[in-house]
Image: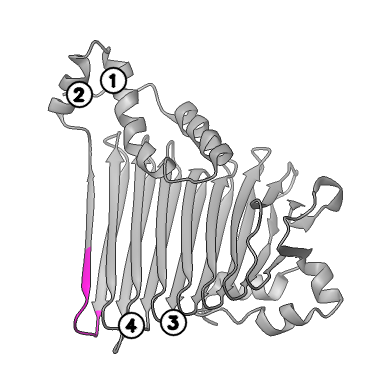
Amino acid sequence: MVFVDGIYVSDLSSGASSGVAVTSLAEAIATSDELVRINLGQAPHMEEDDGFVSLNNAFLRDGAVLHIREGKTAERPVHLLFISTATEQATVSYPRILVVGEANSKATIIESYVGLSDSVYLTNAMTEITLAPGAELEHYRLLIESENAFHVGYARVDQAANSIYKSKVFERNVGLGRFDLYTRINGENSSCEMKGLYYTSGSQHMDNYININHEKPHGTSRLYYKGILDGRSRAVFGGTVYVQPGAIKTDSRQEDKNLVLSPNAEVDSKPALFIWADDVVCGHGATAGNIDEDTVFYMRARGLDLEAASRLLIYGFAGEIIEAVEEKGLRSYLEQLFLESLPSYKFEF
């Protein structure tokens, strides 16, 4: 499904995968679709005092509705492509995505935001995901906006028992961006895996704010983000795991690693745990720094010049997240995107 400046364009879109019913949000609202009437705006943790959430609720006009049928597996991924075009004046769009996965369903969604010019614009996007018992969703999110773009994105996920949610986020280009992801583990034996890779350069600013709320026993969560910072850019990572009373046997790990290539770049990382239950296994950590001298020496001893060794080490740092992409075509695209983005850098000591 292709959206241009927030509006669905059927002529640029193609048929959906079997097992998944896909419609535009504007059409679903116009026809009083029962799925939308019951689920839209019902995601957890949609605070009324959050200005950007309120703006999206007030001005939402179009978006996508994905209904994954009970027991069905989508044969191929559903790609939601949001394109911002060139305009003389600053513009704003409010795309909304609603995903409902019924019991024991399985699907993959790719959510992409692309800018075609250096125009100034704001994208205020929101995704609501509801997973019934046994449902599984692989969710990719790509941010490739223009360098003058402002992007605020939200994702709210509600997981029932035995459900699986996998999020993989790749953020390469935006002037100022923020991604706010919240998942509620609302059933026993549910799991979520959240991985992300961001690369900032110039004066870019990227903010990732991830929250996982374990409300039921025997839940598992893994949060692993990596960042590469160059120039005068700045990144902020906030990862918080809540283990509510009664959520025994919770197993949670979170980690944020950052490779800082410039003395003028800055990263602020704040992992946190709030635990109100006994008999849990939880841990977190964060690192930021450059490559050590011994590692560079090892690479150069294998016959590589300093620049080639530096680029290979930088890509090796990013490759751990890219290699986790299960879709081969998407993985190849991300490899090319990040390889072409890497700076002509030499580790100096």
Front one among 276 and 190: 190
Front one among 166 and 306: 166
Among numbered discs 2 and 4, the one appearing first in the sequence: 4
Q: CA distance from mark 4 to mark 1?
A: 46 Å
Front one among 303 and 55: 303
Q: CA distance from mark 3 to mark 1?
A: 47 Å
Task: Decide if residue 181 is on the left or right side of residue 344.
Answer: right
Disc ID at residue 187: 3
Among numbered discs 3 and 1, the one appearing first in the sequence: 3
Q: Quadrant of residue 151?
A: bottom right
Q: Percent position (x, y) of residue 330?
A: 56, 40
Q: CA distance from mark 2 to mark 1?
A: 7 Å
Span shown in magenta: 275-283
User: Secondary structure under badge 2?
Assistant: helix
Residue 260 in view in this figure: yes
Amino acid type at mark 2 = Val
Residue 94 in view in this figure: no
Pointer 2 and pointer 1: residues touching (CB < 8 Å)? yes
**Per the image, is 281 magenta?**
yes
Q: CA distance from mark 2 to mark 4?
A: 45 Å
Pointer 2 and pointer 3: residues touching (CB < 8 Å)? no
Mark 2 highlights which residue? Answer: 296
Amino acid type at mark 1 = Ala
Q: CA distance from mark 2 to mark 3?
A: 47 Å
Q: Percent position (x, y) of residue 58?
A: 69, 75
Crowding near pointer 4: few (<14 within 10 Å), some, many (20+)? many
Disc ID at residue 309: 1
Residue at the (31%, 17%) spot, across then down: 307
Closer mark to the observer between disc 2 and disc 3 = 3
User: Outermost residue, left direction?
Assistant: 294
Q: Is residue 305 above or below residue 211?
A: above
